[in-house]
Amino acid sequence: MSSGPSGDKLIRVDMTNQSAEVVEFPDGWRLLGGRALSARILLAECDPTCDPLGPENILVMAPGVLSGTAAPTSGRISIGAKSPLTGGIKEANAGGQPGQHLMKLGFRAIVVTGAVPDPDRRYALEISTDAIEVVPADEYKGMWNYALCEALHDRYPKTASFISCGPAGELGLSGASVACTDQDNRYPARHAARGGLGAVMGKKGLKYVMVDPGRAPLRRPADREGFAALCKSYTKSYLAGPQMFKKGTSAVVPAANALHTFPHKNRTSGQSPDVETLDGARINESFKERGGTMHNCMTGCIVKCSNIVHDAQGRYKTSALEFETLTLLGSNCAIASWEDVADLDRLCDEVGLDTIETGAAIAIYMDSGKMEWGDSEAAKRLVEEIAKGTELGRAIGNGAVATGKYTGHHRVPESRGQAIPAWDPRPLKATGVTYCTSAMGADHTAGLVVKPGLPTEEMAWESQKVQIVNAVCDSSGFCQFLQTSLDDIRAFYAALYGTPVSREAIHDLGWQCLSDEWEWNDGAGFTDADDKLADCMQQDAIGNPPTVFDVPREIIQAAKQRMPAREDLFASKASG
Amino acid sequence: MPRVIIPPPFQGPTRGQGEIKVEGSTIRECLEAVDAEYTGFLAQVVGEDGALQRFVKLFVNEEQVLDESLDMRLGIDDEVEILAAIGGG
């Protein structure tokens, strides 16, 4: 039996002198990918006190351990750096094709340091089987993401995929996302959205990355038969099951509303009167007359949770119109129509913005009285203003906290500087524990716990458990919606490298990722005192019966103290 | 008595209980019996029109109830499991 994929490399890019070199990937890191790899590199190489928009920050783009293999739905890519939004370590995760393509070429990560000396210049990183080089890209400066990708389609082979930042990133705005192109149309609809990593990319002068795998084959596992059998059995089992996400996350809207976690009007309520018109079922109903469909964003995905949404004239409008976007840009702003949210989603993807942060910021602006609730046209103009870099546009584009300061408004739902997502910590208190303790800040993908009846004494374990599972999942390349467990992931790892991976080892991998992140944040100046939510989450009650986030501090802190593994740790599914 | 398996997202009204034995000869009767003991449970699963909520799936003895009929008859040892897709970004 072979030892599995070997000879992997890292691409080191220095934007200060626009150079790229390929270096060895440490063999001892072979079970590190995605989020865990990003954390390890940043802990080793990035000064936590650096200016997040300066040359000392390091931008990591790392596919998962299983990316580029035949494992189903395993092509996720992690983008990591010091976040200009939170001031802490950040990992944001996206689907699309670049993760698969990088790993098929044997590149475990791209590590970008420095910044171009002339901030008006733009460059691109080209990666193919022939060459890896940094090239001038001034002609793409300021381009919106869709127009950029259309131009790149003409320039590069059809096999290429792209990672880019939009005008928001080039302006250095803390709500800026990193876009990845999807499988079918190669549209920039998959975003590593949270934490402003698009600004890190933009301020380094890196406008886009092109990855062309050509005819590179899938990565070969050590135990080819065992790996193939795992792929087959997992896929068969998944497809024979309920496939709960096959109509998209937008279908969660009515369930979330029933649980009082469909925030309305800047989270002053957990339910919306517009639940019917924002329900993802309306999107699915539109497919029959307008076209559009469900699809997979990456090759090998069996979940197919992504939607392709058309307008009333049957033309492509946007893709990946998700639950969080329908909530934060819809219900939270009292915008009632899913079609208006689709317009806003497209605009955010174009400008390169996190729809959660942008929706939270716009809702604060509305709540401050400076814009009418539900004024979708004004909201669209605001997003366009972000791209122009006006004073107001910059405030909104810098996210919820910046908008709160700009307006002087008191209600700013955030944790560690990042806007709280749709999953509200008041009815979902264990999720609130995750928001308080995760180095990521208010990030539901760090560990979502949807257990409204959970006793307080179990919240620390439930949060820690899902944080560990999600950290491993986000390091593996698997999409969280495939809902793999630690036992599933270690089985795939064992077949990939021909070496058993114990439960203890996979637990250690997950815990080490969290520890690396906490250690980095300690260096950035964070303390236990920062493990909290905004006052409004502790004061403004929602739900039935009305409830606030009132988890005792000792429970919150317990989530950061490693607990002995319980049986449910290894069978629990990723949840985000 | 049939058993009703309740997923964590719906355990608010049942105060964390995930498995409840109730009297009932159909799925509907069993769900109503749970609600009689734990008010607020039924509305999570069944809509105002009396049909299964769209985001919920039912399994009886691990077989999906494909026609989503709440009038399906149950035996005394049957298990009704409720599944709901609650998650997503």
Image: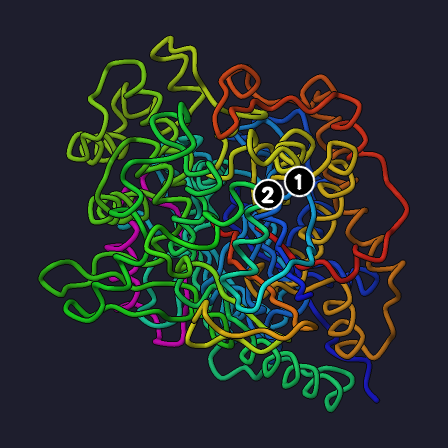
Q: Nearer the viewer, residue A274 or B45?
A: B45
Q: Amino acid at mark 2?
A: Tyr
Label 1 CA crowd tier, 10 Å (few <14, some 14–19, many 20+):
some
- Which residue is tagged 1? B15
Residue drawn at (25%, 43%) of the image: A344
Label 2 CA crowd tier, 10 Å (few <14, some 14–19, many 20+):
some
Answer yes or no: is residue A116 visible: no
Location of residue A240 in the rendering, given as x and y in whole percent from the top left corner? 55, 80
Quadrant of the snapshot with the N terminus of chain A: bottom right
Q: Amino acid at mark 1?
A: Arg
- Which residue is tagged 2? B38
Q: Are marks 1 and 2 in contact (CB under 8 Å)?
A: yes
Residue drawn at (83%, 54%) of the image: A507
Count of numbered tags: 2
Q: Which residues are magenta?
A: A141-167
Q: Based on the displayed image, in which of its 4 quarters is residue A292 positioned?
A: bottom left
Residue A556 lies, with reference to residue A8, above or below; the image says above
Location of residue A499 in the rendering, given as x and y in whole percent from the top left corner? 86, 75
Provide the secondary structure element on which disc 1 rests.
loop
Residue drawn at (56%, 75%) of the image: A241
Relative placement, left or right, of B70 versus A529 is: left
Q: Chain of mark 1?
A: B
